Amino acid sequence: MMRKSSAFLLVILLLAMTALTACGGVKPSDGGQSGSGTGTQQQSGGQTQQPSGGEDKKPANSLERIQAEGVLRVGIDASYPPMEFVDEDGKTPIGFDVDMAGAIAEKLGVKAEFVIIDWSGIQAGLLGGHYDAIMSSMTITEDRQKEMDFVQYITMGISYASRPGVEVKTDADLAGKVVVVQEETTAQYYIEDLMANQGIQPKELRSFPYATDAFRELANGMADVVAIDSPVAGYYAKLDPDLYRVTGAAEMEPDPIGIALRKGETELREAIQKAVDELKADGTLQQLAVKWFGDAAGQ
């Protein structure tokens, strides 16, 4: 039990502290941080309060938010060399799209940050707000345009990479062959259309979550041909010519490839379009194509 004298002293101390606070004599703690940078304080709920004399000004749109944060977050499926894949350290994204995204971010005055995600969930990740854009060799289709806006930056066709002893030169040569593709890609949809509408019937059509899985099937002799974007087929053919050979191409016009954005983010889309136009004009896009594609198709 507290003694009376101690209780009396405690009351005096409390009164003194109250008086000091009312006179501005007690400063809020800065949490031990240095005084450099902004002079904002974090309130409960994570909101930022500006110092007296100014109100918190929220970014008016996605472009302003990205520029305020200094980061453009880009979703990629890092299993698609030479477009987007992981370096030998097992964690650093590299590839044509990675370099291109970095160049676009620089034009916006920010840095690119990459979020690696499986292809099957990449669109949902964008629509859910986990990143600002998808730059992962995504073909612009009517169905995708219903959900997202696009900025086109290249076109790509589909090539046929065959195992030794197999020569798939044209669409008709797919008949009776074991064909492998990456799932939910333009190549898969193209082969399915040939089967349904052109009367071309492969022995089997198998799809895999990753392009690397498709080429592994080819290397193991479990498939005859991989149908895939031309730069990717060319990359594997150069990687190991004894296992992979580009023997033909799909009889189709090259597909438009675009940067996917959420609907309605007009300022961001226009800024990225301007950046892409400038990178085409100054030769940067062509330089990156030569760096990553070499003789493989890619425009």
Image: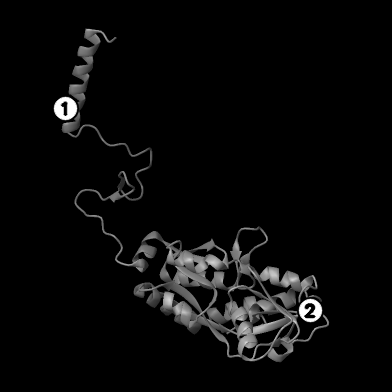
Could you tell me which quadrant the N terminus lies in?
top left
Question: In the rendering, at what x and y percent does residue 15 appear?
Answer: 17, 22
Q: Position of residue 281 (x, y in %)?
A: 48, 84
Residue 110: which numbered mark, if any?
A: none
- The picture quadrant where one finds residue 33 is top left
Residue 264 sits in quarter: bottom left
Task: Say which element carries label 1.
Answer: helix
Q: Is residue 282 visible?
A: no
Q: Amino acid at mark 2?
A: Arg
- For label 2, the residue is 163
Q: Is residue 54 left or right of residue 295?
A: left
Q: Nearer the viewer, mark 2 or mark 1?
A: 2
Helix, strand or loop status at disc 2:
loop
Question: In the drawing, does residue 178 fall left or right of residue 154?
Answer: right
Mark 1: few, some, or many residues within 10 Å (few <14, many ≥20)?
few
Q: Residues within 10 Å of mark 2 (few under 14, many from 20)?
A: many
Name the one closer to the observer, 216 or 276.
Answer: 216
**Residue at 54% from the left image edge and 82% from the top image edge:** 154
204 left or right, relative to 38? right
Q: CA distance from mark 2 to mark 1?
A: 85 Å
Q: Position of residue 191 (x, y in %)?
A: 64, 83
Kind of residue indicated by mark 1: Ala
Residue occupying the point 81% across, 76% down:
242
Q: Which coloring applies here?
A: one colour
Name the N-terminal-most of marks 2 and 1.
1
- Asked if one can make out residue 156 in the rendered structure from this viewpoint, the answer is yes
Q: Outermost residue, right direction?
A: 165
Is residue 34 positioned above or below 168 on the image? above
Say which quadrant the C terminus sits in.
Answer: bottom right
Question: Looking at the image, which is closer to me, 93 or 195?
Answer: 195
What residue is disc 1 on? 19
Residue 89 image position (x, y, % from top left): 66, 58
